[in-house]
Image (cartoon, grey):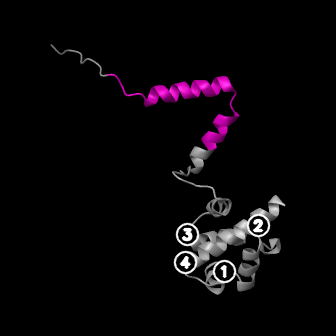
Amino acid sequence: MAKKNVQLNLGEAVRRLREQEGWNQEDLARAAHTTQANISKLERGDTRAYSKFLLQRISTAFGIRVFELFALAEGVQLVGKEELTPEEHRHLVGLRRLPPERRNMIFAITTTLQSPQKSRSRKGST
């Protein structure tokens, strides 16, 4: 039953975004390179209309990412969200795979590096 609610919520989110843009289903279909029938099915929660590619195209048409579409569907606030670069993501995944003692060591190093440097006395000053 929860799966059906997510599908209906997603369809409702698409409909709300479409209406906010002042678009009809045909307008969204054109922007997302699909058919009006697919948009209609999606808005009704028909799972046969769902595909990763369609959701990506719809999200792009609205100027958002797929995860933002799902967050909107589930009522999740994405306040202050920050996107990671691929390199940052790779490092984060690597950090999460480390044993806790190594992770703590990395945290201690980064904390030290982020601390303001203490002023050093200049040599040769009188």
Q: Is mark 1 on a helix, strand or loop?
A: loop
Quarter holding the C terminus is top left
Amino acid type assigned to the residue bearing label 1 in the image: His
Marks 3,1: beta carbons within 8 A: no
Few, some or many C-alpha atoms within 10 Å of disc 1 (few <14, some 14-19, many ≥20)? few
Q: Does the magenta stretch include residue 102?
A: yes
Q: Which amino acid does label 2 sit on?
A: Gln
Question: Where is mark 1, residue-wise?
Answer: 33
- The answer to the question of whether label 4 and label 3 lie on touching residues, with beta carbons closer than 8 A, is no
Amino acid type, callout 3: Gly
- First along the sequence among labels 4 and 3: 4
- For the stretch drawn in magenta, the main secondary structure is helix
Residue 121 is tagged as none
Q: Is residue 111 left or right of residue 46?
A: left
- The image shows residue 47 at horizontal and vertical percentages of 81, 71
Is residue 24 rendered to the left or right of residue 40?
A: left
Tag shown at residue 7: 2
Mark 4 vs mark 2, CA separation in Å: 21 Å
Q: Nearer the viewer, mark 4 or mark 3?
A: 4
Q: Name the residue under label 4.
A: 21
User: Disc 4 or 2, which lies upstream in sequence?
Assistant: 2
**What residue span does the magenta drawing correspond to?**
90-118
